[in-house]
Image (cartoon, grey):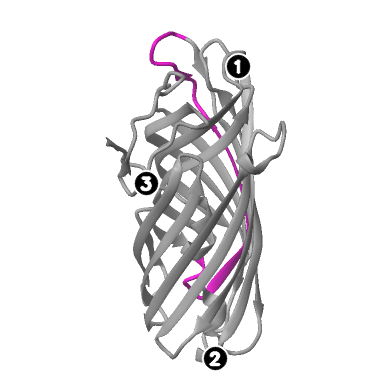
Amino acid sequence: MKYYFTIAISFLAFNYTLAQNYVDILKVNASTTADNTFDTSTTKTKIQQIDADLTVPIKINDRLSIITGVMYETFQTKLFEDGNVKTFGSTALKLGANKQFNDHWSGTAVLIPKIASDYNTISGKDIQVGVVGIMKYKKSDNKNFKFGLYYNSELFGPFFVPMVGMYYLSPNKKFETNIMLPLQADVNYKLIPFMNIGVNFNGQIRSYHLTDVNSTHHSTYIARSTNEFYAYLKFNITKGLSLTTKIGQSLGRSYKVFNEGDKVTFGLPATFIGGKREQLNTNFSNGLIFQASLLFRIHLDKKPTEQTHKE
């Protein structure tokens, strides 16, 4: 058994934000790191990342909405000290529904198929399927509690994550807390109408199929894992459009490469159960991360009949 202190599901980002009186329709991130040194040499590499998340909820009636969308991410970095820079990423669809049961309880279920690959060739090895279910208890317009379960057919084996979270907005609408553990946490304060200051956390573990990563290994996968802590400034350009600049630090970061058949029995938060895997490459160091995010948000009516949009 090997222990990890990083969990993440990029697929759940939309559930994290759709619990309030707004929907984040489109979010685009671009990030880069400082030089990261491999553990066994002086060789260095950067990590370049671009990702986008589009969510389109479709109202069926006052109690039911369909959730659709697409997510895309791409990375560029060295995986081996003597290798070239490798490009890999994923493309995922979101298809699900939100049901408002009464004035306090609502539920969301979403199916998330994706291709996670270096895109050199596409086969069944590149396809993963995830599903998430979340229940929300609305205490008031400014406070709610959430719990749920996520499953994904990762390349290292079945992966399960139980989740619990909450949202709170102060009466003066300046202080906001949004938490979904063990995935994400955000605390921010509106200094002036056009600027918020905040801190947030993202934990991540994802897998991607690789072909011909080097001359020795022709079919492998990478298990990408990190905890990222950020401080940020968010500039509110209009009511629905904002630009965020972040500086952060990674902890427990690893981009581990394994042979495609090297798997565990199943994964849970903070632990993998079953067979010991043999890592093929060398880890590189933690370090600084610089990120810019553009967000387009639609604010919603707070009437009870409109609550179906909030998930």
Disc 3 from disc 2: Cα separation: 39 Å
Viewer-proximal residue among 287 and 58: 58
Q: In this view, does 34 lie above or below 240?
A: above
Disc 3 from disc 1: Cα separation: 27 Å
**Span shown in magenta:** 17-42
For the residue marked with disc 2, what is the amino acid? Thr
For the residue carrying disc 3, how many other residues have a C-alpha within 10 Å: few (<14), some (14-19), or many (20+)? some
Q: Name which of mark 3 and mark 1 comes first in the sequence.
A: 1
The circle on residue 214 is 1
For the residue marked with disc 1, what is the amino acid? Asn
- Residue at left 59%, top 36%? 49
For the residue marked with disc 3, what is the amino acid? Gly
Q: Is residue 211 above or below residue 24?
A: above
Residue 25: percent from the left, percent from the top? 63, 64
Instruction: Note whether residue 252 is visible.
Output: yes
The circle on residue 267 is 3
Residue 248: percent from the left, percent from the top? 43, 38
Q: Name the residue under label 2.
A: 305
Q: Quadrant of the N terminus?
A: top left
Q: Quadrant of residue 138?
A: bottom left
